[in-house]
Each structure stands twice: as structure tokens, then as C-alpha cells.
Amino acid sequence: MRIFKDEEKLSLEYVPPVLPHREGELRLLNAFFSSILKGKQSISVRVIISGSAGTGKTAMAKLFGKQMEAEAKGRRMNLRYIHINCRVNRTLFTILKRVVEHLRIPLPSRGYSTEELMHGLLDYLTENELYVIMALDDVEVLIKEEGSDPFYFLMKVGEEREDKMSRLSFIFIVRNPEILSMLEGGTRIGMLNNIVHLPEYDTNQLYNILSYRASEAFFDNVVLEESISLIADLASERGDARYAIETLWRGGKYAEAEESSVVTPEHVRKAAASIYPAIKKENLAYLSLHEKLILLAITRALASNENAYTTSSELNEVYRLVCEEYRVQPKAYTRFWEYLQKLEDQGIIRIRVSSEGVRGRRSYITLPEIPISILQRELVRLLEGGSSEF
Ligand SMILES: Nc1ncnc2c1ncn2[C@@H]1O[C@H](COP(=O)(O)OP(=O)(O)OP(=O)(O)O)[C@@H](O)[C@H]1O
Ligand SMILES: [Mg+2]
């Protein structure tokens, strides 16, 4: 049973042809660079892309680069986008060397200084009527290595050779833009006005992104809608699309390993647990009796219907059955609710309150990062081992 149509589509290197929920930001980025395409470019453009982990900075920059190159080609302009990761190329010198190599500029790679490389590059661009957009990704690493120097250098070259520098533009990609504003010369190279900030994704946005990425990577109807909702919900705490996509891919691998034809919420839970194991077996022993009973009830409620969520009233019924089974007097509803919140505080469960009007407001309970099967086995073992009442 094949479930993956094209697994590569979930790999980290792959850049999707569209980025749902980044249309506005992409337009803004284009607007900053539109003067280049109009051929009236007389200054070097500098733009910052900021946003926390997994908000699509790298993906958006690369997609922009592709679109920009295509657009320029249509206008018979010579433009190249070069994406450089500062984790790999940690100094301005190695970055410039990469650019020179990429463009196959015939400069000796040895015995050259940063200045000479830069001037050689600018001369080449002018002679060949070429525009280059350099994207420096994870620029915090460059700042850590060389501080303000690279920016000061760019500013100086920009001032000295204004005419030629206009052929070379920059995108600086950074999680926290404050880092750049603290730099000496940072403001003077005139990049701080042009910021494209990517806010964290919310649950709905993650849901749409996941549906789209799942449709590229899996055959139709393989990933259950419930599973996509669950991943979106788990990832929404971070607003992180990378975590979401990685969980989707791993969920697929678990389904594949079990020869399942669908990716279920349980596969998702296993995947999530394998990425960030949230709860350890040994911590379960420290839960109070009723916390254990409630947790066991949650695993049963979730396992019985393959649901990603159970409601608090449904759960209370299952809890009362579990108490009966273990010959324990069930706690009143308010106490039960207190225990639920304690479990949430410990990060073991998650409670979501839906916002469908005040009346229709219901609580949904889910186990974010723990496979039910493992948890259930462990709880039964602990409960049967006869733990003391707290
Ligand atoms: N709007 C979107 N639609 C589809 N996929 C997206 C979207 N945003 C991000 N992704 C995907 O999520 C993953 C993470 O995105 P990306 O690598 O661009 O994050 P980032 O902001 O660069 O994070 P970091 O700061 O950790 O480098 C990538 O696989 C990317 O393709
Ligand atoms: Mg990135």
C-alpha cells in the first residue's frame, strides 16, 4: 500500500511554488524590489525578512528569488538571486567567495582580500549588465562571527562606489530584527526601514498549509482530516510550519511502517512524541491517583473512536467508568475539572475551548505528544501496582 505520492515534497530543501498565507508579505517584498525590474535602479536595495522559527522566511525568500529571476528573464534583464546560508558561510569573505564562484567570475580564489573580491564582483556586474540579489540567511551567525564589520564594510563600499553598488542588492534574513538594529552602522546602510515581518501562523493557517503540503506529498484521502487538525493544533503553540510539516512526514512514516492506508491521529501522536518527547514514563508515577485515572480515561476515550479530541462531558463519563473498574469513588465534577487543569499545567494534556459563541463553547481535550497505546499500558501497570491515594 503506497501512501506517499511524492515524499520529497516534504523535505526541507523543497520550496513549494505557492505559500498560503504569505501572499501579502510576498507582495511587499516584491514592492521593495520593483524598481530593479523597471530598470531605473540607482540604489542598492536592502530588505530584512524577520520572524520566529518556521514562519517561512527561508521558503519565502527562495520563492521570491525564483519569481524575480523569471520576471527579469521575461523582460530580457540579467538578474540572479543567490541564497547564502551564514551557518555554512560564516564570514563576509567566504560569502563573497561563494557569490564569485556561483557566478563563475574568473577571479583567483587565493590571495584575494574581501575588498578585492567585492570590487571584482562589482566590476563584473557592471561590465556584464548583471543584477544580483544576495540573500543572507541566518544572518545572526555572521553577526556572531564578525559583529558590525561586514555591515560597516558594505556601507563604506556602497558610499564609495554608489553607481556600481546599485547592481548588488541584499536580503537579510533574521529571526529577531532587533539584532540588526543594535549593529553599528546598521541604520546607516539604510536597511532598517524595509522590514518584511512574518507573524507566527495560527491554527487555521497551519491547517491550510498542512492540507496543501499533504496534497502534494500523499495520495488523496490518505491523511485524515482529523490528523491534519491535530497537527495544526499541536504546531500552533509554536506557530511553526516546520514542526508541522515534520510531524506530518513522520506521521506518514509511522503509517507506512504499520502498512496502514491512512495517516491517523494516533500516527500523528507517535510522530510528535518522537520529535519532542514531552512526558517521560518515570514522571507518570508521580501523578496522583485521580490524575492517573483521568489520564487513563482520556486514552480510552481517544482510542475508542479514533478521535483526536474528547469533550469534557464525554470524558467525565469514561472517568466514572474507570473509577468503577478500580473500585474508587469518583470525584465531583468541579474536582475532576481541577485535575484536568493540573494535567494541562504539567503539559501532559491540552484543553482547548472552542469559540463558537458562548453557548456552544465546549472544551476539547487532547493528548498532544504521547501515543495512546504506550501511555495506556504504563498507566494500567501503575494502577495495578497499587498506588497510594493522594
Ligand atoms: N505558508 C507556507 N506554505 C507552505 N509551506 C510553508 C509555509 N511557510 C513555511 N512553510 C514550510 O515550513 C518549513 C519551514 O519554513 P522555513 O524554513 O521557511 O522557516 P524559517 O522561517 O526560515 O525558519 P528558521 O528561522 O528556523 O530558519 C519549510 O518546509 C517551508 O517550506
Ligand atoms: Mg530559515
Image (cartoon, rainbow, N blue to C red):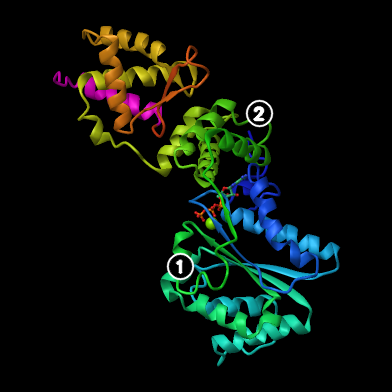
Q: Report how far apart the C-alphas of labels 2 and 1 lie in the structure.
A: 42 Å
- The residue wearing badge 2 is 221
Between label 2 and label 1, give the one nearer the viewer: 1
Q: Nearer the viewer, residue 257 or 315?
A: 315
Which class describes the residues within 10 Å of circle 2: few (<14), some (14-19), or many (20+)? Answer: few
Instruction: Classify the position of the C terminus by image quarter.
Output: top left
111 with respect to 300 (left or right): right
Q: Which of 275 and 90 is in front in this view?
A: 90
Q: Residue, x 48% and y 65% (percent of image)?
A: 180
Q: Do callouts 2 and 1 mark residues in contact (Cβ within 8 Å)? A: no
Amino acid at the residue labelled 2: Asn
**Is the residue marked 1 within 8 Å of ligand 1, measured from its CB?**
no
Label 2 element class = loop
Q: Residue, x 85% and y 64% (percent of image)?
A: 75
Magenta residues, as a range?
371-390
The quadrant in which residue 256 appears is: top right
Q: Which residue lies furthest to the bottom in this view?
A: 111
| Picture layout, residue 2 above or below residue 182 | above
| Picture layout, residue 53 above or below residue 39 | above
- The residue wearing badge 1 is 141
Residue 270, image x and y in percent? Answer: 44, 35
Q: Is residue 285 inside the magenta stretch? A: no
Instruction: Answer whether residue 129 is visible to the viewer in this image.
Output: yes
Q: Residue, x 51% and y 17% (percent of image)?
A: 357
Which is nearer the N-term, disc 2 or disc 1? Answer: 1
Quadrant in which ligand 2 is drawn: bottom right
